[in-house]
Image: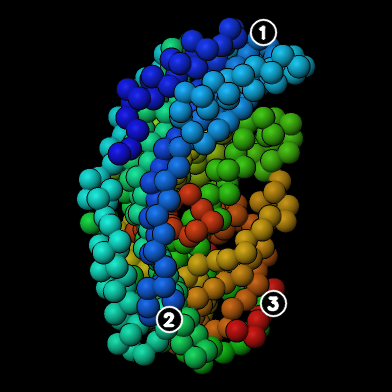
Amino acid sequence: MLIGPEECRRVGERVFSLTDADDAVVNIGHSREALTRIANNAIVLNVFTESRSLQVTVAYGSRKGSASCDSLDDDAVEAAVRRAEEVARVSPPDPEFLPSLGPQEYVPVQAWFEKTAALDAEDRARLALRLIAPAKERELRLAGTVETSESAQCVMTKNGAFGYHPRTDAQIGCTVTAPDSSGWARDVTVDIDRIDPEKLGQAAVEQALKSASPRPLEPGRYDVVLMPAASGHLAEYLVWWADARTTLEGLTYLSDRFGQKLCGDEITIYSDPSDPRLPSCPFDGQGLPRRREVWIDKGVFGQMVWDRWTAAQNGREPVARPGSTIMEGTDKTAADLIRTVERGVLVTHFWYVRSVKADETLVTGMTRDGTFLIEDGEIVGGVRNMRWNDSCLGMLQRTVAIGKPGSCADVELMPSLYPPIVVKDWNFVATTDF
C-alpha cells in the first residue's frame, strides 16, 4: 500500500524529535513502478520495483547538512538524522541561508486514479498485445513499453509546512521498424483509460510504411512541421533556461531581455499543476508552492524561476520550477498544417538534442522515426534522417501556424502538452545514411 499523509507526518515528527538542530526539512518518497517490455512483437520482460526514500536536511544557524536513506524504519531514520547533523556541524556557514518555509497553501491536484494503480502484469500484457496488433498484421516489428506507477511525495518542515502528493502515471510507447524505415508513437497520462494502445501502434505503423525507401535531402533551410514531441522538446528548454539567478548574472537568453516581447502574439506557454489533462505535484522539494504561471504571454517573456534567495534580494515572490508545461494552440490538425506547406519536412520527433550555446538558445539534434517530405501540401514520401542546428527561441519566432496541443511524451522530457507547429527556414546541416 502506498504511504499515506499520516504515516508521512509520523516520520517527519520523529525526525524533528530526534534532532536538536535549529531547523529541519524532511522529504519522503514512495513509488511502486511496473514495466512490461516488448521486442520483436513479443513480451520479453515484466518488472516491478518498489522503493522508499528519505532525505533529512538540518541547520545549526546557517550551517546545513543533508543525508538520505532508502528506508523509513526507525533505525534508518535515526541514522540519517545523525549523519545530517554531523555534516551540518562541520559545514561552513551558508551566506544565502534562509529558514525553512512555514505553513503553505497548495492548489488541490487530482492525479491519482485507482484503475491505473490497480493494473497488474496480466492487464499490462493485454495492453501490450493491443499495441503490437497493428504491426503484427502488417508483418512489421514493434518494440516498446507499457509502464505504470503509483507514487507519493511529501515535504515537511520544522517551521510548519506540509505537502503530500499522491499520483499515478501511465506511459505507453513504441517504435515500429520496416526494412528501411521506422515509426514512433508515445503517450503519457495519469489515467490509463485515456490511452488507446491500438491507436498508438497504428500511428507508428503508418509512419513506418509512409517513410519507406527514404530519399536523401540536401542540407539547407526548409519549412518544417514539427509534431508535438518535436516542438515541445525545444520549447521546454526556454522554460528551463528561464532562471532568474543566472539571467541576472547575464548568462541566459533573457539577460537584458526579460519582460520583452520576443515572438508573436500566438505564442503562450504556461504551467498549471491542477490542469486535469496533465496534473503535476503542487510543490517543489523545499515545499514552495507551484501555482499557475504564464512563462510566455502572447510573445512576452514575463516570468522566470525565482529561487527564494534571489527573489528576496530583488523584492520578488519566489516562483518554483514547473512540473509540466502547456502551450496554447488552435483546433487545427496536423493535416491542416501540412496543407499550408508548399515544400518542406515533417518531423515526428527529435533525439540526441544537445545544447550548443544556451545563452543564444542554440541547440543541435537529429530527426528520428518518421521524417517526411512535403510538397504542395501533401506528404510525398520519407526522407533520410538529418542533423540540424537551430535556435529554440528562433523556432517560436519563425512559427507561422499552430495546431491542437497533444501529448509531448519524449522520454527525455517531463510530460507536457504542445501543439504541432509550422516553422519557417529550419536549418538542416547534414544528412545521414538511415
Q: Which mark is residue 61?
A: 1
Mark in front: 3 vs 1: 1
How would you rate the neighbour count of disc 1 (Cα within 10 Å): few for under 14, some for 14-19, many for 20 or more? Answer: some
Q: Position of residue 69 (x, y in %)?
A: 55, 33
- Residue 2 placement: quadrant: top left
Cα–Cα span, label 3 and label 1: 56 Å
The disc label shown at residue 40, or none: 2
Tell me the CA gap for discs 3 and 2.
31 Å
Most foreground residue, 22 or 421: 22
Percent from the top left, x then y, of residue 23? 57, 11
Query: Which is more toward the observer, 33 or 369?
Result: 33
Residue 256, visible in the rendered structure:
no
Q: Amino acid at mark 3?
A: Ala
Q: Quadrant of the N terminus?
A: top left
Q: Residue at x 25, y 68 (%)?
A: 126
Q: In the image, is residue 233 above or below residue 387?
A: above
Name the residue tied to disc 3: 430
- Residue at 55%, 15% (x, y): give it: 24
Q: In the image, what residue type sits under mark 2?
A: Asn
Circle 3 — which element? strand
Determine whether, in the image, residue 158 is placed left or right of residue 257: left
Tell me the distance, in whole angstroms, between the alpha carbons under discs 2 and 1.
59 Å
> Of helix, strand and loop, which one carries label 1?
loop
- Residue 221, compared with residue 9, is above or below; it is below
Provide the secondary structure element on which disc 2 rests: loop
Query: Residues at badges 3 and 2 in contact (C-beta under 8 Å)?
Result: no
First reached walking from the N terminus: tag 2 or tag 1? 2
The reply, left or right, for residue 192 in relation to residue 343 is left
